Amino acid sequence: MGYDPVMSDYSDVLYDPAKHTHSSCIAEVQNADMVVLLIGSRFGGTAVPEALSELDAGNVSSKLTGDGSASDGVKYSITQLEALRAMDLGIPIFTFVDAKVYADHHTYTKNKDEDFADRISYASIQKPETSKYIFEFITFLTHLSSNNALTPYSNYGEIEAHLVKQWSGLFQMLLRDSRAKKSEGRRADAIIEQIQDLKAAMLQTISAGTVRDAARAVIKYRRVVDFVIAMRHYTQSLDIADYRGSFNDLLADFGVTEVVQAVEGGGSGFPRTVLILNDDTYLRVRVPDRRFEAFAVEWAEFSQLEKETKVAVLQGVSDVGVTTLSIVQHYNRPFQPEQARTDAMIDEVEGTLSSEVASKWTDDRIDLLRTMWSDGKTASQIAEAIGDMSRNSVIGKAHRLGLKSRPSPVKANGNA
């Protein structure tokens, strides 16, 4: 069909000499983009206990039923563990069940609680003693909250026909998502521009003094403070306002043992920073790697502020809150460089939101803004002269250009 299958039958799996072949098969799943799962009349090879190390044993026990426990590996096939690994990684699974097995599964579910259930011999199952492990796995798949579609098949032509339709649909969805992403990106750019305008307008209305210093600090240090507040979840007893250590000291107190750079898939987007925690799990920081490196400098400056100002900044950022994705995302598993490519896909959208883009501010309009601003014209007068521009947009652009701030004309006239 033009795709590259990864099949152990043809040595496509890398067999790590330090591992059992079963473990190698399960480890290979993370390199797949999708999994085609065939359930037939045979239970398949029973996975060795070592293979379970590729999964959370408790997670396996909660998902599968049978006489064997997750600790000894009895009655768990390699295929089942491969499928579970794909689910853990969020890899799409296309499941096909032999039509005869599928029909017998209905008989099994209707009678499994009866006294005679263990004496039923199903014609579709080669070894009667394994029937319930196959049927229970089918039941488990149908009860998943997502990716739970099962397709009966009588021959491989039916499988191929189904995959052609499904994968064509996925391709169509990908094209639609690509168009939607571009549209959302343009809307996000417009929102960012408006936010910058509002921040500049806010500073124009705040009088000099401690309040203005705190407002400036919120704008300047919001991102690093947002990160610190998110990290405080892992060490809640830490007093950020009184903390005087370096940024590296702060990370260590948060339980970070190592800082590494994640590998992005396909060479797209910004590299991300990964923080390895002392409990062998890890965090992905949802900012470009260079932006994270700047946190050390920003933290050094922030930590030197007066405590009153730091408390105000921490409170201000906390009050605003983040209703979307947190700046850090926790992954409850050991960090694996290969898996980072999958995790990075989650962060791609936010990476596109970090830069200021050109809008309707042409060079001629910027020159006119500079001239009228230096002549003492009000933001409203400048907006009217430029046309198709709001007063707040003028103030925001002036702020981003670094033009000299001016006192509020209302307060200057004594009308406040």
Image: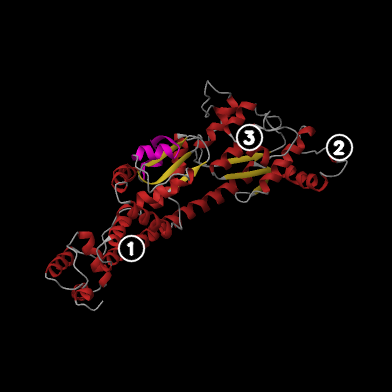
| Nearer to me, 106 or 256 | 256
Q: Which residue is mark 1?
A: 195
Which of disc 3 and disc 2 is earlier in sequence?
3
Q: Is residue 134 above or below residue 172?
A: above
- Residue 69 lies in the magenta stretch: no
Query: As displayed, is residue 70 above or below residue 396?
Result: above
Which image quadrant: the C terminus?
bottom left
The answer, for residue 203, to whether it is visible in the render is yes
Q: Earlier in the sequence, mark 1 or mark 3?
A: 3
Q: Type of residue at label 1?
A: Ile
Q: Position of residue 268 (x, y in %)?
A: 36, 44
Secondary element under disc 1, as helix, strand or loop, is helix
Q: Is residue 230 left or right of residue 412?
A: right
Measure how far apart labels 1 and 3 are at the Cα level: 47 Å
263 falls in the magenta region:
yes
Residue receiving disc 2 = 119
Span highlighted in magenta in the image: 246-268
Q: CA distance from mark 2 to mark 3?
A: 30 Å
